[in-house]
Image (tube, rainbow, N blue to C red):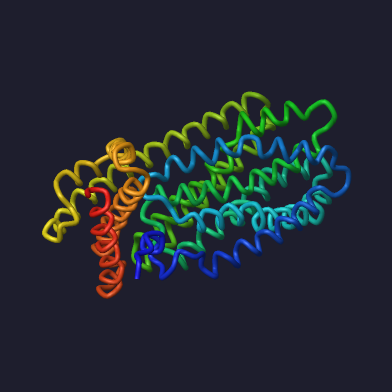
C-alpha cells in the first residue's frame, strides 16, 4: 500500500480528521450561531461592517502564529478545532455566565456602571480564560502526544484565543456608539489584538509543560498557566479605571509577557534542534540519515533553503518529500524525548518510530534521486 505521509506524521491510521475533531467543530459551529444571536440581539447596527472589521486583522494574526509553527507543524484539523472552540463554545459559555453574573450579582449590588466594571475586571477574566483553556486541557487529556513543548502550547492557545477575540470584536463593533466605531477598531483591532492570544498562550505553556511531566505532577503547571492568564486579563480590563496611565502600564505588562513568550519560543526551537542532533545519528546505519542531513535539519533557514533548491532543480514533488522528511525527523527526535522521560511505553515507541523511519527512507529516496 502507498504511504500516507499526512497520516504517519499525525500518528493516526488515516489522515482524515478524527471523530473527536469532527464533533468539536460541529458543536462549535452550533455554539457560534447561538452566541452571535445572543450577542447581537437588541440594537446591534452595521453587523456586516462589524464582521468585516473583526475579520480584517485575522489573516495577518493567523500568519504570524503559523509562522511560529514551522519547525514541527501541528495537524491542521487540530488547529481548526481549537479556533472553532474559541469562536463558538468559549464565546457562548462566556456570554451566558458573564451576563448572568452581571444581572444577578454585580448590577443589583453595585448598580449599572460599577456592575459593568466589576464584571469586566473580576468575572470576565476568570470565566473567559476557563472557557478558552478547557479545550487545551482536553488536548492534554486526549491528544497529549501533540504537546511536545511550550511552542505547541502557545500555538494552540493563540488559535483558541483568536477565534474568541474575532467573535467578541463583532459584538463590540456592532454596538459601538455613533461616531466611535473607528476608535473602537483602532483600540481592539490595532492596539490590542494580542490581548486574548497572550493570555491563553500562558495557559498553553502550562498545559504543554504538564504534558511532559508524569501524571502526578501535571496539576501545578496547568494551574499556574491559568493564574497567569487570569491575572494578565484582569489587569488589562481593570486598567481603564486609572485612565491612560493605567492603560499604559497594562500595555507595558502585555509587552513584557510578549517578550517573555518570545524568549520561550527561541529556547524551545534550540531545544528541538538539539534533540534532532542528539537522537538521529543512531539511524545512520539504516541509510535514512547522513551528516549532510543533520546540517540541513539544524535550523529553519537551512531547511527552507534545501526545499527551495530541490524545488528549483527537481520540482514540487521532491520538495514536498523533503518537507515530509524534515517533519518526520523532528517528530522522531521528540518521540525519543518523550520515551526518555518515561511518557511512552516500549511498544508505543516502536509503533510510532517505525512508520516515521519508513517515511524518512521513502522521502529521502525521492528528493535525493
The residue sitting at the bottom extreme is 347
Q: Position of residue 67 (x, y in %)?
A: 44, 40
Relative to 158, say whether 134 is above or below.
Answer: below
The residue sitting at the right extreme is 43
Relative to 225, say whether 28 is above or below.
Answer: below
Asked which quadrant contains residue 219, the reply is: bottom left
Q: Position of residue 252 (x, y in %)?
A: 52, 29
Asked which quadrant contains residue 55, the reply is: top right
Asked which quadrant contains residue 188, the reply is: top right
The residue located at (55%, 43%) in the rendering is 197
Q: Position of residue 14 (x, y in %)?
A: 44, 68
Number of numbered tags placed on the structure image? 0
Report the side of 263 relative to 132 (left or right).
left
The residue located at (51%, 68%) in the rendering is 18
Q: In the image shown, does 228 or 15 lie closer to the viewer?
A: 15
Q: Quadrant of the N terminus?
A: bottom left
The residue located at (43%, 50%) in the rendering is 205
Report the side of 118 relative to 19 (left or right).
right
Q: Position of residue 285 (x, y in %)?
A: 11, 59
Q: In the image shown, does 227 or 8 lie closer to the viewer?
A: 8
The residue sitting at the left extreme is 285
Relative to 9, say whether 45 is above or below.
Answer: above
Amino acid at each position: 500500500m502507498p504511504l500516507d505521509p499526512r497520516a504517519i506524521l499525525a500518528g493516526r491510521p488515516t489522515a482524515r480528521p478524527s471523530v473527536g475533531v469532527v464533533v468539536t467543530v460541529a458543536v462549535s459551529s452550533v455554539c457560534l450561531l447561538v452566541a452571535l444571536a445572543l450577542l447581537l440581539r437588541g440594537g446591534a447596527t452595521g453587523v456586516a461592517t462589524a464582521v468585516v472589521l473583526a475579520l480584517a486583522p485575522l489573516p495577518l494574526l493567523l500568519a504570524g502564529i503559523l509562522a511560529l509553527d514551522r519547525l514541527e507543524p501541528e495537524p491542521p484539523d487540530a488547529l481548526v478545532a481549537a479556533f472553532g472552540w474559541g469562536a463558538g463554545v468559549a464565546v457562548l459559555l462566556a456570554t451566558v455566565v458573564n451576563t448572568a453574573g452581571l444581572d444577578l450579582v454585580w448590577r443589583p449590588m453595585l448598580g449599572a456602571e460599577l456592575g459593568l466594571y466589576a464584571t469586566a475586571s473580576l468575572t470576565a477574566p476568570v470565566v473567559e480564560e476557563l472557557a478558552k483553556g478547557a479545550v487545551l486541557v482536553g488536548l492534554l487529556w486526549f491528544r497529549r502526544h501533540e504537546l511536545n513543548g511550550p511552542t505547541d502550547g502557545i500555538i494552540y492557545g493563540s488559535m483558541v484565543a483568536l477565534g474568541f477575540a474575532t467573535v467578541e470584536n463583532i459584538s463590540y463593533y456592532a454596538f459601538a456608539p455613533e461616531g466611535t466605531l473607528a476608535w473602537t477598531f483602532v483600540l481592539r483591532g490595532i492596539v490590542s489584538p494580542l490581548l486574548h492570544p497572550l493570555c491563553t498562550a500562558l495557559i498553553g505553556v502550562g498545559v504543554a509543560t504538564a504534558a511532559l511531566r508524569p501524571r502526578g505532577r501535571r496539576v501545578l503547571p496547568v494551574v499556574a498557566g491559568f493564574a497567569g492568564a487570569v491575572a494578565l486579563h484582569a489587569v488589562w480590563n481593570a486598567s481603564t479605571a486609572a485612565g491612560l496611565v493605567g492603560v499604559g502600564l497594562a500595555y507595558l505588562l502585555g509587552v513584557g509577557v510578549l517578550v517573555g513568550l518570545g524568549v520561550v519560543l527561541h529556547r524551545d526551537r534550540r531545544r528541538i534542534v538539539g534533540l534532532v542532533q542528539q537522537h538521529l545519528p543512531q539511524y545512520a546505519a539504516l541509510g535514512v540519515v547522513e551528516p549532510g542531513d543533520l546540517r540541513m535539519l539544524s535550523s529553519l533557514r537551512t531547511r527552507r533553503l534545501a526545499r527551495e533548491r530541490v524545488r528549483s532543480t527537481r520540482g514540487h514533488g521532491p520538495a514536498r518529500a523533503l518537507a515530509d522528511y524534515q517533519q518526520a525527523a523532528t517528530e522522531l527526535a521528540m518521540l525519543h524525548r518523550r520515551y526518555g522521560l518515561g511518557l511512552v511505553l516500549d511498544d508505543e515507541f516502536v509503533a510510532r518510530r517505525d512508520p516515521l523511519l519508513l517515511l524518512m527512507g521513502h522521502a529521502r529516496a525521492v528528493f535525493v534521486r
